[in-house]
Image: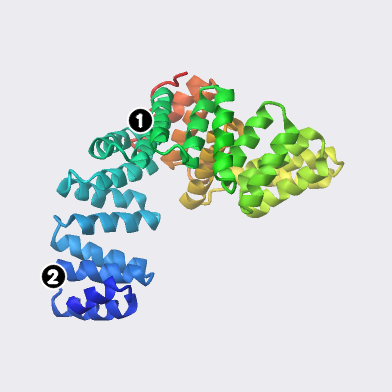
Amino acid sequence: MHLGVLRYQEKSFEEAAQHLQKAVQLNSADPGGHYYFAQALQGRGDTDAAIHELQDCVALKPDYPDAQNSLGLLLQHSGEVGQAIKPFRQAVKWQPENPDAHNNLGLALLQTGDGNGAISEFQTAVRLRPTDSGYRGNLGAAYLQVADFDTAVSEFQGALQLTPQDATLHYDLGLVLKLKDKLPEAMAELHKAAELDPGQPDVHYTLGVTLWQQGDFAAAAEELRAAVHAKPDYAEAYYTLGTVLKQKGELQDSASALREAIRLQPDFAGAHTTLATVLRQLGDAEGAAAESRTGMEIAKQKTGDQAALFATNSGRRLLNAGDIEGAISQFRAAISSSPTYAAAHFELAVALRQQGKSEEAQKEFRKAAELDPRLMPPPSRKK
């Protein structure tokens, strides 16, 4: 095993894996052998096998925090965020003074919609390492998820005091200021983020949506074009660009942008219905009818949890950028794909509440909690 560990440390992952596999075969009861074999497997890109070895490792020795943390990270990166929470909790249990362990658990909880649980973990991480701006930023994101905008602003500002040139923190602060309707301050932060990281598509996208809402269609289109230039597969940005160009009266360009959104995301119901409107204005009644039918069929089609997750993530991006109608369309499409997908009901409730539809929002919050008791309604929006 020692030779295998040495080769692993030298980053000779293939040779390390061969030696460590033999070590595990000779002594399958040694948790250290499974752990290092997993690291070598991960190094050569064999994630599934690495997960299997780490599961064997922690079954033999639950109080192995490095193995628990590695297992959580691999599961998280593989899209199994819910499964990652258990090993992350074990890592925290066995290393309660490790801020990274609390931060990793907090991120997993945040990804699964447990904002309040994430807040507790990030607060502990910050307490243990107060100079880490990443922890402060994550804490701000958790407060944003539970709609505590004032505290989110405070955390993002505190993080920026530690790392004032962090484009992501400026962007996050801009988002929450926008949600608080503090548009001049929000725009200043978003422009700063774009200045620091011109290749960040979400910054340009959010600027585009904000300028569109302010009625500056030309500047909005410019930012949205910058977004799709930075990220050519950005379906939501193409959709919003098509909507802006439609309002500018540039119908052919609008149709082109909407068709690209549909090419990238064929089940984007809002893009189909908006394209139907544009085609109708262009005099293409047959094409408009076809797009309208497609949009309606997508809304009814059940394509399972994968489609629901995709649409919900798309809706979250639209909602974060301030496009509530577009977000609601995506959340409803997610629910149509998978009526029991709790996260989609929860996010739809958040969007409906921001739209002022309290009764509908409460209905969706109740449905989300019924499907997943961890999804409790966040506090009412603060300004």
The answer to whether 128 appears left or right of 333 in the picture is left
Label 1 is placed on what type of residue?
A: Met
Viewer-proximal residue among 3 and 72: 3
Residue picked out by circle 2: 30
Q: Is residue 124 left or right of residue 188?
A: left
Question: Which residue: 44% across, 24% down?
Answer: 362
Depicted 350 relative to depicted 234: above or below: above
Of helix, strand and loop, which one carries label 1? loop
**Circle 1: is it few (<14), some (14-19), or many (20+) Cα within 10 Å?**
some
Q: Position of residue 176 (x, y in %)?
A: 49, 29
Give above or below for 20 relative to 194.
below
Identify the residue at image location x=55%, y=45%.
197
| In this view, the mark in front (2 or 1) | 2
Question: How many dots with numbers?
Answer: 2
Question: Dividing the picture into quarters, in which one does residue 247 lie?
Answer: top right
Q: Position of residue 357 (x, y in %)?
A: 53, 21
Q: Position of residue 5 (x, y in %)?
A: 22, 73
Q: Residue at x 53, y 35 (%)?
A: 320
Residue beneath disc 1: 376
- Which quadrant of the figure contains the N terminus? bottom left
Which residue occupies the extreme top position in the image? 383
Disc 2 secondary structure class: loop
Q: Position of residue 300 (x, y in %)?
A: 59, 43
